[in-house]
Image: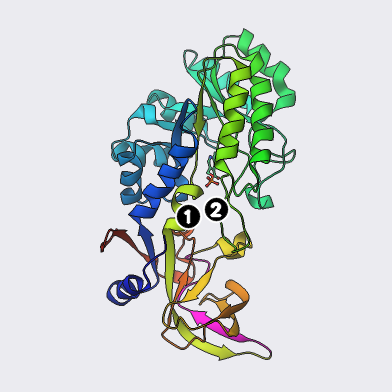
Amino acid sequence: MSFEHKLLLAIANNVGTPVYVYDKDRIVAQINRLKTAFKNLPYQLHYAMKANENPEILKIIKENHLGVDAVSVNEIKHALSLGFDKNQIIFTPSCPSEADLAFAFSHDIHVHIGAVEYFDFILKSFPHKAVGLRINPDTKIAGNQKIATAHYNSKFGIPVTQLNLIKKYLNAGLKVDSLHLHTGSDVKTWHDLARSAEVLMDFSKHFPDLKYLDLGSGFKVKYHPSDTEIDLQAYAGFLQKSLKSFNRDIQLKFEPGKFIVSNAGVLLVKVNVVKQGYNKKFIGVNSGFHHLIRPMYYDAYHQIVNLSNTSVPTQTYDVVGVLCEEDTFAYNRELSPVQKDDILMIENAGAYGYVMASQYNLQSLPAQVLIEGNDYRQI
Ligand SMILES: Cc1ncc(COP(=O)(O)O)c(C=O)c1O
């Protein structure tokens, strides 16, 4: 399934640029791929709403019967305001305040606790609440250091070496009904995910009253043409086997963000200028890291297509933005020859795109559009 270029050009023309464009059918197709892969598992999906929390995107998530994973009180409030039931929301905050935790507990939202240092507060203020524990399995496997969240030096989760301390709190009355891990984004092979899952299953031996194991996400999508997507069927097969030998009545949860929305979105930008440097040709577009920060922050590769000229790519450019500092979308990229006012499509921008945008340099935020079938509307 690919975006129809004529439609994208019409959107750029009518709505203006820069504009994020999402396609509902592609989102639903990705959800269905997950449902197909996991169909033989006892599982539930909680969309990581941080990836894209536009209300219209969340409506699609809800229509398809997924829950959400929230990471802030405002995300919880947002999900509740859109009609998600409190049982469909899980809360996986990083270093939250006690007030954040109190909000979640008092709204009956299930919380994943990522530090033993919160246990005294929980026992004192919410002694009857059962919590989930986010474990750090010490497996460094994500695609990039900035999105690796389960390694020895990571701030996330409780080190497995703190088991004895956890046991002390269990004896003191702490109720633990689930375990969680998230190894990071962009995990290249299912074997890596499986390794973390094994650590969690092994750790769960010490917790007799578990309702679920939450295995997070990290499901890679294809950014570079040479990338391979994660083999979800193989991962699901591994989990099915493991659950059999695990032999406990337990549910699995997954928290996919990127897999659901990333390739369902593109960012359309307009060429302000094509300029010659000493040694390079630059395409200056009406955007920058204030709209899409992934190429600069994660060194992420995003495909770029010149929608205004789809001839064979023959020219090499650096694609840069309008900010007062380095904001390069692509270095030495071969594109079809580009002229002022051409519209470029930056692919795979549906996840961690608009949500990470800012108004740095007092620039405006991009518009957002949802395609539904042959129609589109601003959202
Ligand atoms: C706790 C947690 N769950 C799920 C996700 C979603 O990961 P992805 O977008 O790679 O699917 C993240 C992403 O950072 C996360 O921190």
- Residue under numbered circle 2: 221
**Mark identifier at residue 262:** 1
The quadrant the C terminus occupies is bottom left
Q: Main secondary structure of the magenta part?
A: loop
Disc 1: residue Cβ within 8 A of ligand 1's nearest atom? yes
**Mark identifier at residue 350:** none
Q: Position of residue 363 (x, y in %)?
A: 43, 71
Between 201 and 90, the one lying in front of the other is 201
Task: Determine whether label 2 and label 1 are within 8 Å by CB.
Answer: yes
Q: Residues within 10 Å of mark 1 (few under 14, many from 20)?
A: many
- Residue 72 in view: no
Q: Amino acid at mark 2?
A: Val
Does residue 165 appear left or right of residue 365 in this picture? right
- Residue 304 in view: yes
Foreground mark, 2 or 1? 2
Q: Which residues are magenta?
A: 279-291
Between 325 and 260, the one lying in front of the other is 260
Q: Residue at x 54, y 16 (%)?
A: 210
Q: Is residue 289 magenta?
A: yes
Q: Is residue 294 above or below residue 110?
A: below
